[in-house]
Amino acid sequence: MARLSSAALVLAVLPALAGAGAEYGREPAAAPTRLEARALEAVRTRVRPAPGTSPALVLAARELAARALSSDPSPAAILVAAAPDEVPAAVARALPRPSATHAGVGAVERDGTAFVVVLLSERRARLDPFPREVAPGAQAALSGTLLAPFSRPRVFITRPGGEVVDAGGAAGPAFRVPLEFPGAGRHVVEVVAEGEGGPEVAALLTVAAGGASLDAPTRTAAAPEPADRSSSEAGVLAALNATRARHGLAPVTAAPEVAAVARRHAEAMAAAGRVAHVLPASPDAGARLRGAGVPYRRTYENVARAGTALEAHAAAEDSPAHLANVLRAGATRAGVGIARARLPSGDPTVYLAEILVEPPDDGAASPLTPDARVREALWRERARLGLAPLTADAALDALARDAAEHMRTRDEPETDGLADRALGLRRRLAAVDVFVAGGPDDAVRSANVKDARFARVGVGVVAGDSARFGKARLWIAVVYTD
């Protein structure tokens, strides 16, 4: 018995997973053979709740079985070689007890030995029909519904040249996102959703424009995994910076304090046997950085698992949303952490966490005060929205400054009665936005900046450390009136 590598799996099964037709979202016609049916029954006795049979997974598993691939670890596929009569028992022994919504088993016999591949899939979305092949310049809408408990779908595309596009998303489980395929080549389309463990990939599709191949580009053989964990982590950081360099971005520098946070999360994933951004013993990356006293404005995290650290990083870059994190222009520092473990099959595996950090904006590079920079950000946002400019109001500024100082002192982004105090200045309409931010430009988060009824604004900004929100925070209060 052996688990199959993620890269080999993707290369071999994409056409079968897509279905026999020209669209995603439709299952092909495929009936399990007698041997495959017996193996599937063994799967259903082992996996709870019992997964349904997916014809697409049957075809994919059958193709892998015919190739009799071997040994690199992957959580999605298992290869069993046994005498035909011993297949059900061999499959039952090989399977851990994961959760799965769909399963497929492919089997071939050679010289008295049955090669059986089991594919387990936990589907997170139901997709409407979507083309696998398009003409250059074509447009198509990707639509579907996330399955519980997933929410907030968002679609990303990696273009043939490596550019990542955030195509938008939806607030509810149903989504419909128009996509463009401007040039020939292989486009990777990904649906990311929020789950109990943070952001997760809900669907991954490959679309060929202009007759391009659906297959992933062939990679050079991965270097052996270094025995020293720090060397493995340094190798991943070098690979990450090589990708940034190919896209004309400056490298991120190694940050030991961020790497320590990443390593602890990798260890938490290994202990849980699960790849996730959020675990019971390890909250989201922002909370982990704050708990470690690491200041940041924005943070981006990639998590993955594979046979080696570099293979795990390569798997992350295959995901458009993860690649987008690698290519964040504002990120200047990063930490990489790995943890080594064994899968239930006994195969070695590596859990990887990469955290990229955009440092806090302390305003040192700007001649403007933080208050002035907040106003400037609000002015730009109003202009972008096509709304009339706001007028700075000294009386509102005083209210906002007092509110910001009060928030910092209490370590609480709340300002009871601030709108009423603004109405006391003989105004008919007032609203307040308050938040804790990593830089003045974050003021565009102010929801009321979009309200055309407001004509005046007051801004208050106080800098300081927060026990709740981390170091080098800005406490911002914005007061609007007519």
Image (cartoon, rainbow, N blue to C red):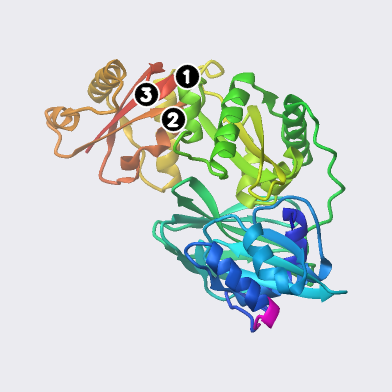
Q: Quadrant of the N terminus?
A: bottom right
Q: Amino acid at mark 3?
A: Arg
Is 328 displayed left or right of 2 in the figure? left
Give the spatial CA distance, label 3 vs label 2: 28 Å
At 45% across and 63% down in the image, what residue appears? Answer: 147
The numbered dot on residue 67 is none
Taking the magenta stretch, the answer to whether it contains residue 359 is no
Is 81 rendered above or below residue 275?
A: below
Q: What residue would you read off at disc 3?
A: 468
The magenta segment = 30-35
Residue 199: percent from left, percent from top: 51, 47
Q: Of callouts 3 and 2, which one flags the residue occurring earlier in the amino acid sequence?
A: 2
Q: Amino acid at mark 1?
A: Leu
Give the spatial CA distance, label 1 vs label 3: 28 Å
At 72% across and 74% down in the image, what residue appears? Answer: 85
Q: What residue would you read off at disc 2?
A: 376
Give the spatial CA distance, label 1 vs label 2: 10 Å
Residue 246: percent from left, percent from top: 78, 41
Is 170 displayed left or right of 188 in the figure? left
At 48% across and 31% down in the image, what residue appears? Answer: 286
Q: Is residue 104 visible?
A: yes
Residue 99: percent from left, percent from top: 52, 58
| Crowdedness near tag 2: few (<14), some (14–19) or many (≥20) residues, C-alpha within 10 Å | some
Is 172 rendered above or below residue 301?
A: below
Q: What residue would you read off at disc 1?
A: 368
Circle 1/circle 2 CB separation < 8 Å:
yes
